[in-house]
Image (spheres, grey):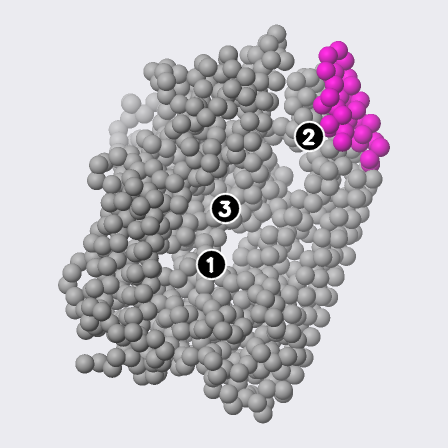
């Protein structure tokens, strides 16, 4: 019989599993319609626990062993039994398949019910995933079993899973009694950065079909209807929690819909006598009202239309909650969520009594099971037309600015000369370029299998004709890109790629091979983007750093050298901070020079810009309704067809033009390049050489190396976010100053409305022409504030790291020598990493900023 102390981990796990089962049973009582599913999940977890106890020879009721401490040898044996690679578990019982709805119909759940069975958390709007403690079921499986259950190509994922299991075990052994343990427990967490790929293009270009083909789910996103189009943002990502197809529907608020109803009613009542043919606002209002209310809206007030009876099918909307659909197949899910995502100009024909809820939807997140391609990537399908809802518009701006890649989708026929596709790219170029994080633009020409007059040719001639035409299309698109100076300011030729794809041929292969459809090229790109090797290296090396700190604090033996080491570290830090300050000061000076030029050009040109906008050039006679919409919407209007109208950007254009080149040089979106000429990326305390000099401080210095890389990564992440605000501050200052003028202009009605609106806007701009100087000063102040924050975070974080590394009493910390050896061994097993050099980029993209350090309550120069 093994030492009873070996049962302590099993006891801890048993208690945790019992707690989970109790929580599920409580939720099952509350949600009767899901009782069977929850019971099945509880039974599965109980079976796993029994298998685990049987594996270790434990009794059905293991004795209470609270307070017993495992020796390093016991820890080693316990971890080897669970984590030793290559060993199969003696228990031959196959894991039970997760319970699903066997009725063949799609499940609908509130978000609380989703939380009960959730193992890994869902993706947030910012594109980040924060993992809690790993599932107990996963922790109990051997690497061999995890390999069978994990996604394809998961050799590195197994290593990551093993190390996370080790760190979870260490997390449980840290007490909550002191600040250091609490600090370390917070460190043992990770953030899974998801790459966002934005997919946009004109209505009917084939975005949904493209996504379906790439993820090889033919019937997932609704497509193919001539009169229908995607009307809300759809995110597509992997379902890492179950084998179900899921859709999470986020609604706008009741207040927002009430405001829209009031606006629709005011617009329709005040424009009864006007010609409505071709009026975008009229069509938009009628389309949304008819989708949700049928014909009833015509006889009802906006207050009546908010009655609960209209929302019986979607109580989540009234409760400000998200709706969750779960189905066994893509076909079922698509049929269920189509009414939340698609508008149809013929939605009344043959659909009497059917409601469409897309006007109330803010965003839909679709999760697809068994898709390794999407494990760390989210595809975002943007609607093909404009939207007047502010919350949807703000979400769109935020997410498109976070995309690392943007796909512009258009039909291959006249792709180079397709006006709308290039207008879309130009309209978002500043938002995704200097104002965002986009590194690559992919111009994707769809329906590349179509060839004119192909009926008279043989299959060989059709194939050769398609291939030749596709190459000509690529050449034409690239030539057009080089002519677009507005886009070239933000993106170089190397960041622009052209693809000619055919979803139909990829699925059927009549004339083209799969490779010639170029769908595999896009899949390969996503796989590279999805490559989690860097995440694994970051996590494993970060775990090594934390374990090194714990063990170093326990081992002691640095008292005689800690003062000398800390002095050298502080000297190195002062030199590095001086370099950063110098580089950033030079950058601010260069920006000030550029902006001064922009201010002067703005003052000279704003009059002509206003004239061209207000009078549409030499012909004059701007359409009153169009100008009315612009001033009512704060200087911005997106017609259903045509380009975005933005007077604020026109007024700020000389300022943004003046800094575009310098801005791209200072804040490159290329992740390989660092901001401010790489001065932050090159920040180093020279710990490697100090390790050679002070051998007995190696563990503490390795932790410092981890912290150094971590804080640099965090600063780079912070800079990426701040640079968007920096760039947009020029236009936002103009927006704020113009707000009063827009409000006055929007108040005019009746005779001479057009004349009064024009004169009001002109007079307001003339009286506020110092707004260009204000915009310059606002941006420079934000730059100086960024410099202060960077220097303060670096200094504060690293100084407190010195304190934590060298002035901590480790008496209350567990012995982690065995875990330290195991994690180091796992790191050495990672492909593509040197065995003789540990690159401690620990938690590089995963943990918090300097605030985490200050939350420990430590003061400079004080011992913990």
Q: Secondary structure at mark 3?
A: loop
Q: Which residue is mark 1?
A: 191
> Measured from the top left, where is residue 490 in percent x and y?
61, 45
Q: Which mark is residue 795?
A: none
Query: Crowdedness of circle 1 by 10 Å Cα count: few (<14), some, many (20+)?
Result: some
Residues 744 and 704: in front is: 744
Depth order, front residue of 388/19: 19
Q: What span is colored magenta in the figure?
A: 740-769
Whichever of labels 1 and 3 marks the residue nearer the N terminus, that label is: 3
3D distance between C-alphas at marks 2 and 1 = 39 Å
> Hey, which residue is sitting farthest left in the picture?
92
Give the class, few, some or many, for how many residues have Cα within 10 Å of label 3's Cα (few <14, many ≥20).
few
Residue 483 seen from this side: no
Q: Is residue 751 located in the magenta-colored stretch of the structure?
A: yes
Whether pointer 1 and pointer 3 mark residues with C-beta atoms closer than 8 Å, the reply is no
Residue 648 on image: x %, y %: 70, 34
Determine whether the residue tagged by mark 1 lies in a helix, strand or loop.
strand
At label 2, counting other C-alpha atoms closer than 10 Å, the crowd grade (few under 14, some 14-19, many 20 or more) is many
**Magenta residues: mostly which secondary structure?**
helix
Horizontal side of residue 733 vs 468, given as left or right: right
In the rendered image, which residue does mark 3 sit on?
125
């Amino acid at each position: 019989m093994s030492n009873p102390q070996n049962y302590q981990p099993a006891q801890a796990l048993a208690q945790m599993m019992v707690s989970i089962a109790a929580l599920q049973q409580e939720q099952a009582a509350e949600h009767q319609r899901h009782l069977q599913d929850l019971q099945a999940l509880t039974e599965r977890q109980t079976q796993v626990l029994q298998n685990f106890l049987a594996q270790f020879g434990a009794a059905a009721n293991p004795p209470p062993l609270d307070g017993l401490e495992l020796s390093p040898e016991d820890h080693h044996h316990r971890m080897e039994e669970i984590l030793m690679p290559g060993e199969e578990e003696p228990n031959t019982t196959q894991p039970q398949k997760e319970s699903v709805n066997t009725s063949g119909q799609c499940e609908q759940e509130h978000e609380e019910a989703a939380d009960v069975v959730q193992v890994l958390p869902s993706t947030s709007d910012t594109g980040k995933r924060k993992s809690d403690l790993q599932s107990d079921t996963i922790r109990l499986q051997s690497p061999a079993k995890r390999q069978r259950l994990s996604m394809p190509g998961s050799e590195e994922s197994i290593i990551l899973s093993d190390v996370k299991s080790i760190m979870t075990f260490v997390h449980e052994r840290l007490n909550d009694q002191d600040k250091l343990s609490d600090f370390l427990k917070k460190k043992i967490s990770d953030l899974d950065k998801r790459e966002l790929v934005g997919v946009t293009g004109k209505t009917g270009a084939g975005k949904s079909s493209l996504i379906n083909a790439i993820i090889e789910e033919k019937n997932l996103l609704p497509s193919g209807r001539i009169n229908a189009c995607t009307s809300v943002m759809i995110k597509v990502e992997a379902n890492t929690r179950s084998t179900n197809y899921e859709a999470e529907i986020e609604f706008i608020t009741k207040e927002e819909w009430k405001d829209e109803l009031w606006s629709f009613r005011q617009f329709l009542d005040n424009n009864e006598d006007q010609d409505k043919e071709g009026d975008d606002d009229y069509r938009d209002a009628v389309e949304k009202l008819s989708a949700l209310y049928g014909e009833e809206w015509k006889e009802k007030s906006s207050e009546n239309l908010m009655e609960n009876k209209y929302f019986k099918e979607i109580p989540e909307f009234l409760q400000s909650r998200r709706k969750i659909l779960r189905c066994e197949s893509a076909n079922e899910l698509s049929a269920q969520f189509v009414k939340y995502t698609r508008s149809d100009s013929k939605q009344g024909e043959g659909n009497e009594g059917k409601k469409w809820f897309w006007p109330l939807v803010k965003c839909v997140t679709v999760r697809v099971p068994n898709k390794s391609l999407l494990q760390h990537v989210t595809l975002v399908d943007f609607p093909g037309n404009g939207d007047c809802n502010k919350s949807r518009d703000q979400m769109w701006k935020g997410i498109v600015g976070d995309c690392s890649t943007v796909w512009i989708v258009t039909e291959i026929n006249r792709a180079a000369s397709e006006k709308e596709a290039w207008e879309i790219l130009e309209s978002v170029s500043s938002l995704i370029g200097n104002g965002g994080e986009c590194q690559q633009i992919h111009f994707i020409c769809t329906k590349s299998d179509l060839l004119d007059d192909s009926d008279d040719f043989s299959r060989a001639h059709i194939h050769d004709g398609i291939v030749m035409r596709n190459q000509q299309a690529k050449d034409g698109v690239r030539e057009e890109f080089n002519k677009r100076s507005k886009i070239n300011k933000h993106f170089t030729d190397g960041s622009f790629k052209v693809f000619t794809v055919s979803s139909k041929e990829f699925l059927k292969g009549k004339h083209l091979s799969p490779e010639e459809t170029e769908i595999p090229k896009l899949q390969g790109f996503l796989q590279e983007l999805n490559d989690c090797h860097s995440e694994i290296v970051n996590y494993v090396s970060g775990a090594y750093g934390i374990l090194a700190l714990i063990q170093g604090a326990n081992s002691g033996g640095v008292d005689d050298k800690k003062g000398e080491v800390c002095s050298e570290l502080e000297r190195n830090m002062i030199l590095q901070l001086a370099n950063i300050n110098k580089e950033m000061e030079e950058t601010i000076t260069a920006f000030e020079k550029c902006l001064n030029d922009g201010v002067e050009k703005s003052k000279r040109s704003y009059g002509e810009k206003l004239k061209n906008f207000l009078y549409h050039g030499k012909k004059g006679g701007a359409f009153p309704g169009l100008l009315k919409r612009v001033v009512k919407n704060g200087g911005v209007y997106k017609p259903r067809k045509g380009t975005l109208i933005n007077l604020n950007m026109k007024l700020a254009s000389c300022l943004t033009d003046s800094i575009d080149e310098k801005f791209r040089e200072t804040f490159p979106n290329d992740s390989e390049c660092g901001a401010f000429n790489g001065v932050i990326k090159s920040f180093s305390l020279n710990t490697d050489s100090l390790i050679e000099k002070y051998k007995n401080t190696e563990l503490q210095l390795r932790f410092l190396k981890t912290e150094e890389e971590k804080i640099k990564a965090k600063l780079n992440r912070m800079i990426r976010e701040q640079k968007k605000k920096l760039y947009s501050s020029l236009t936002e200052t103009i927006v704020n100053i113009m707000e009063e003028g827009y409000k006055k202009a929007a108040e005019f009605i009746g005779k001479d409305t057009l004349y009064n609106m024009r004169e009001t806007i002109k007079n307001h701009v003339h009286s506020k022409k110092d707004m260009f100087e204000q915009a310059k000063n606002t941006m420079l102040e934000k730059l100086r504030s960024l410099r202060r924050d960077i220097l303060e975070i670096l200094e504060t974080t690293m100084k407190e790291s010195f304190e934590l590394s060298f002035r901590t009493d480790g008496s209350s910390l567990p012995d982690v020598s065995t875990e330290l050896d195991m994690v180091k061994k796992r790191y050495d097993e990672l492909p593509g990493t040197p065995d003789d050099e540990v690159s401690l980029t620990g938690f590089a993209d995963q943990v918090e900023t300097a605030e985490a350090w200050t939350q420990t309550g430590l003061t400079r120069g004080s011992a913990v």
